[in-house]
Amino acid sequence: MKELSIDNLQVNIAGQRIVRGLSLKVPRGEVHAIMGPNGSGKSTLAKVLAGHPDYEVTGGKVLMDGENLLELEPDERARRGLFLAFQYPSEIPGVTIANFLRAAVQARMPEGEELEATDYYARLYEKMELLGMDRSFTSRSVNEGFSGGEKKRNEILQMAMLEPKYAILDETDSGLDIDALKTVAHGVNSLRGPNLGILLITHYQRLLNYIVPDYVHVMVAGRIVRSGRRELALELEERGYDWARQEEREMAAS
Amino acid sequence: MSTETKAVDIDRNKGDFSYDVAHTYDAGIGLTENTIHYISDVKEDPDWVREFRLKGLKTFLEKPMPTHWASKDLEAINFDKIRYYLSGGVQPKRSWEDVPEDVKRTFERLGIPEQERKFLAGVEAQFDSEAVYSNIKKAVGEQGVIFVGSTEGLKNHPEIFRKWFGKVIPIGDNKFSALNSAVFSGGSFIYVPPGVKVKHPLQAYFRINAENFGQFERTLIICDEGSELTYMEGCTAPKFNTATLHSAVVELVALKGAKIQYITVQNWSANVFNLVTKRGLAHEDAEVKWIDCNIGSRLTMKYPGVIMKGRKARGEVLSIALANDGQHQDTGAKMVHAADETTSNIISKSISIGTGRATYRGLVQVPKHLKNCKNNTECDALLINATSRTDTYPAITVRGTGNSVQHEASVSQVSAEQIFYMQQRGLTEAQAMSLSVNGFVNDLVRQFPMEYSVELKRLIELEMEGSVG
């Protein structure tokens, strides 16, 4: 069962129901896109999967390769292979990208084993090249004073270095111009392969022109209202989210 | 068969252990004129020093506790229960081979002889009241640099010692400088001749081993014209149930064009009252720089200062204070501009954890008649928990028209989002906290010598380990 499996998930924040019985399976090797209007609960889903303490799971199950994800601390989930590319990554003043990533890579190594610095830097520079990042980037503090594009590239750089089994990309296209979008998409595409499952969360179809998904799901008001192949995204773009909302109302009524 | 391990008392902190050591000289418990005479007799003080001590005692007894502005916790110090002088003798050894075994193993465990071999130009190691070891690399000694304990300094180099001793910090500067003046013992005496630039740091290590003890070292450093020196001090004590007192006085004199950098990394255990007076006198075009890292202790009160006496003199204080649960770091800086074109810089960073409290007190004085003086003050506080506390008391008096002053202060908190972000990358909550804190102090720590920045980073990690959960 090499898959991230979400079954009838229900989530509250401050007493309000945000995710209302959502089910979804992302096998490794596949890219699934979740599209939906603002306020549909897409980002909540991303944070809940990563274990954000502000959200309360009131029902449902999430299994990662058969293991109950919801019982684990956020850092345990990460070390077991779950990665979240944040929509709004935090700044960590005074901590350089090189040191931060080094600590993160080190955290995945068995106790007593020390990361080999030269190998680490060789790999880091290789991934940076892939993302068109200048080497001087490594000595900048994490996300401090970064442009929108730099922040997103930095997220994908971390993803490349940490080699997750499942990656959730939360609105990775927001705030990017077309060139930055292409670079980020190129980075993500180069990481695609049989060992990685990707959940792509986006508001716009545009991103899917560059990271072509295997499946598309439409999320409205806290649940998936429609799933299909790539063409669904185009249809959605053409017909708009009102059409999806209508579907949701019909589902709720039935 | 467990007797061997029983004699040693270890906790997770590197410095928290003590060995039973029999002292040859012990001034007993409590402080009277007899205590002073006992110390003076053991040390064979000249008359002027004995008188200096007696005057110190008188001033100490007359001065009230500064509790009208400082912490009431000072009242918890019981001066009648403290032992003021403990030593095995007044003559420090020049080789670790000659240091008594029971004392030597303490310093070996703290890694001092190893550091000396690696990167230091000279080391002095003080155990309770006296230096037990003092040595300077041959090449440095041949340049005329003097690096000895204060007892030896006043005995063998009276012409330099007496000229500056007690001049930068007079007996009556404050209650604790008076106490130190009465019972001082140990500390370093350093003289660097004109033009000599000492490449590697000189280091002193102050170790409190005995319970109910007060350590009162007295350091005097004179850098003659155009010379340069970096001096580092480290301090530790075991964790006793009773209060231990550390009250040092440090006087620095930088003559024309000289540069002194004085670095402190203290890691006191939580029973130590650390009440220290430190001040430097900078002559024309001279520079005095204090790098001060305060970790541990029950209460630390310390405000390193620089009096810029000559034109174009510079003063700097870079400080980091970490107040853990139940601790109070009351630290800051004093910058006294007393000549034209003098510049001073204060950068202070504090971290409060749990119920820890960090207080910044800054004093900057630029009188009206001076021209083109500059001061920059930055103090940043980081609060880890909702129960943590920080206060800032800047007192900046700048008069006249041709002078400029800049003051910035910030208080920040490690945010839950930041910790979550780091956890999502695989770091535990404690690792994330410690990385945040290291990031907060990073731009300052970068200015420290390599060996000390590594040590400081490790100490911060140890402090953060117990702070979450």
Image (cartoon, coloured by chain):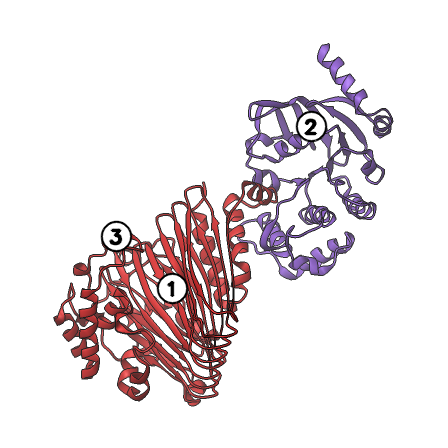
Chain colours: A purple, B red
Density class for disc 3 (Cα within 10 Å; few <14, some 14-19, many ≥20) is few
Q: Identify residue type, mark 1.
A: Tyr
Relative horizontal placement of residue B87, taking residue B419 as reference (left or right): left
In which quarter of the view is residue B86 placed?
Answer: bottom left
What residue is disc 3 on?
Answer: B241
- x and y percentages locating residue A158 in the rendered image: 68, 48
Sequence order check: which comes first, mark 3 or mark 1? 3
Is disc 2 in contact with disc 1, using a CB cutoff of under 8 Å?
no
Give the residue type that dot 3 points to.
Answer: Asn
Residue identified by numbered label 2: A39
In this picture, is A121 found above or below A156?
below
Q: Along the horizontal axis of the image, is B417 left or right of A243?
A: left
Whether residue B302 is visible: yes
Q: Residue at x 74, y 53 (%)?
A: A127
In 3D space, how far apart are the residues under numbered discs 3 and 2 (Cα atoms)?
Answer: 58 Å
Quarter of the image with the N terminus of chain B is: bottom left
> Disc 1 designates what residue?
B303
Question: Mark 2 and mark 1, same subunit?
Answer: no
